[in-house]
Image (cartoon, grey):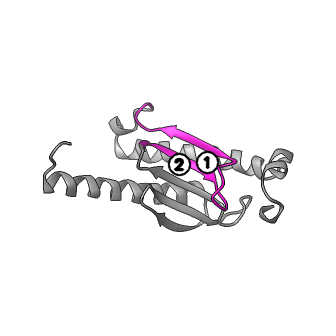
Amino acid sequence: MIRISAAQYRDGIESRNRFMQMLHDALKTALGGVELWEVTSFSWQGYQIKKYSGLKDRQYYSEIYQREPNKLTFHEYYEMSEHPFEMQIDLLVQGFYYLPHDQQQQMLVDFIKIACAEAVKWNSSEKRREIVPEKFW
């Protein structure tokens, strides 16, 4: 294990909080009129999309997992099942951390718009009806 200082820990938490605020703002920008709920657990942090036209209420999330902190995920989730729909962007591979703030924000907005458009297609697909329990249609 590597020793960390209180300052390093504080800086890391503050950076994560700033990223979560940036993600919140990107979701609001990309999905006008969206209703969000901030969600967190021991292994992930992000936002549940409570209500947005074309998506099933409270079944879609945009999150960062602790095990893969450079990957932003947009996925459908219900009853502890595997994600039937999931898209990811690897922020490190895409150069996110080297961009100025406005370009970072735009990268998040663009990813969310693309992921949401694909999720809307998924919602109305026959394959979803085969995989997802009927009560979630």
In the image: residue 134, left or right of residue 25: right
User: Could you tell me residue 134's position as x and y percent?
Assistant: 83, 61
Amino acid marked by disc 1: Lys
Residue drawn at x 40%, y 38% is 96
Q: Mark 2 sits on what residue?
A: 109
Q: Nearer the viewer, residue 89 or 76?
A: 76
Residue 113 is tagged as: 1
Where residue 15 sits in the image (x, y, percent)?
Answer: 29, 53
Residue 84 lies in the magenta-colored region = yes
What is the crowding at mark 1: few (fewer than 14 residues within 10 Å), some, or many (at least 20)?
some
User: Helix, strand, or loop for circle 1?
Assistant: helix
Question: In the image, residue 120 lies at what x, y percent?
Answer: 74, 51
Find residue 56 and report its image quarter.
bottom right
Q: Residue furthest front?
A: 1
Residue 58 visible within the image = yes
Q: Are marks 2 and 1 in contact (CB under 8 Å)?
A: yes
Residue neighbourhood size for the residue with mark 2, other residues' Cα within 10 Å, grouped as few (<14), some (14–19), many (≥20) = many
- Indicate left or right for 28 with 78 as reference: left
Q: Nearer the viewer, residue 33 or 23?
A: 23
Screen quadrant of the N terminus = top left
Name the residue type under label 2.
Val
Q: Residue at x 69, y 66 (%)?
A: 57
Residue 81: where, in percent of width, then height?
66, 54
Write down the region rendered in magenta: 69-93
